[in-house]
Image (cartoon, helix red, strand yellow):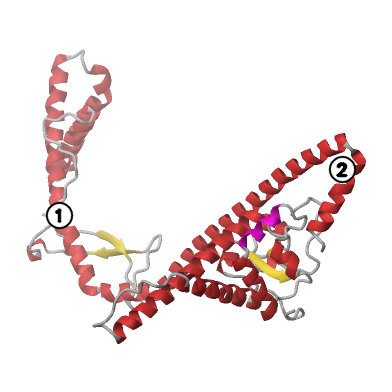
Amino acid sequence: MRRPDHPRLRNPPVTRPEEIGVPPPARPYQGQPAGLVTRFAAAVIDFLVAFAITLALYLGAIGCRFILHPRTFHWPQDATWGMPLVGAVVAVLYLAAGWSTSGRTIGGSMFGLRVVSAREHRLGGVRATLRAMLYVLFPLGLFWVVVSRHNRSVQDLVLRTEVAYDWSTRPDWSHRPAH
Amino acid sequence: MVRNVSVLLPMLRPEGSIVIRNRGMLAVTQIDPDAIDAPARVEFGTDSGPTRRDVPIAVDVGIDVAATVGRQAAGVTRAVARFVRPVTGVARRASSVAGRQPAEESRLAVMAQRGARIRAERTEELKGLVAHAVPAAVNLVLEQVDVAAIAQRVIDSVDLPEIIRESSSSVASATVVDVRMRGIKADERLTQLVDRLVLRRRQEAIEADPHAASGSSEVAESAGDPA
């Protein structure tokens, strides 16, 4: 997709696009490296999801605190670094869980993106966690996609991963174990 | 008073389900208007009085002639023959004679007025008949049909949740496909834009120093993407 003659992924997780209901206009893009716009949009959605989870946890914790100590309850005033830290942990866990299982998060699922290794394997837990940590610590690395020949971010270059268009709902990971 | 009325209704099957067929009809006869408590009022939307001229004069003349012939035909055939002969002559010459012979014109006018009055009377009778017959027929059908059971059977036969699920999923699927395709197109446009800028820079570098430009681009690509 990056170049007209750019080769498709060697063995993308999509078995046969016409079998999984991919519309004809989208079939040529299956397995191609995804561009910055879709990846950025998916990242925004994932950020919102992680934020919502963190907020739910925060409100849940406050609710529990109110139930346990209703008389002495007061709204916490000292949550300066705690919440961003919790949010970062939640984001790492959320991203790592999505990438190490189906290869996609909610944002990736919405835009039909899947994260695979350079050999189109499913990411292992360690690599998915490291990738999530890199994204949380240095999100600007995503913009390297613009100048990369194969649409790879800094995180992709460091961990040898790829993000491809993959609209299949059930990728065939059977012959490609996690690495 | 008309006592025998035929009302066309959809055919009823013994098990109670209504099957509408092209030629399937039910004839309801012998409807007693006295048994109806509150007959519905039927509005036809047209008000045709005896003096209103909304049809050609020949129609009313024909109606009057037919009524006259009908009354007299109840008698003797010979009397009918005596009436028919001049009337048919008048009807045949009505269009050509109108406006030229005052006597026959006035006679035609009287006949037309009489025909219009008869038509209005028949229309009112028909209105009253329909107002009595239709509610009676509907009540008769409703008494014999368990509408609630039929409706329940129809609702049971229709998998409404599945229909809603399919329609909503198809709408959601179409939306997702649209969003994804828009994203892919946006990626393509951004790629083309960046390619154009890079090409322009590369072209400027080539114009400045061809050897240095080619070497720097290769280094940049290899450094930016080792895979």
The amino acid type of the residue labelled 1 equals: Ala
Identify which residue, B135 or A108, lies in the foreground: A108
Residue drawn at 37 percent across, 68 percent down: B19
Identify which residue, A42 or B110, lies in the foreground: A42
Q: Is residue A72 magenta?
A: no
| Segment tinted magenta in the rendering | A139-146
Lateral position of residue A84 relative to residue B104, left or right: right
Query: Which part of the image, by quadrant, shows the N terminus of chain A?
Result: bottom right
Q: How far from the left and from the top, in percent, is residue A163?
A: 69, 64
**To which residue does mark 1 refer?**
B131
Q: How far from the left and from the top, in percent, is residue B112?
A: 16, 29
Residue A20 to residue B213: above or below: below
The amino acid type of the residue labelled 2 equals: Ala
Q: Secondary structure at mark 1?
A: helix
Q: Chain of mark 1?
A: B
Q: Is residue B177 visible?
A: no
Q: In the image as oriented, which residue stretches furthest toward the top?
A: B100
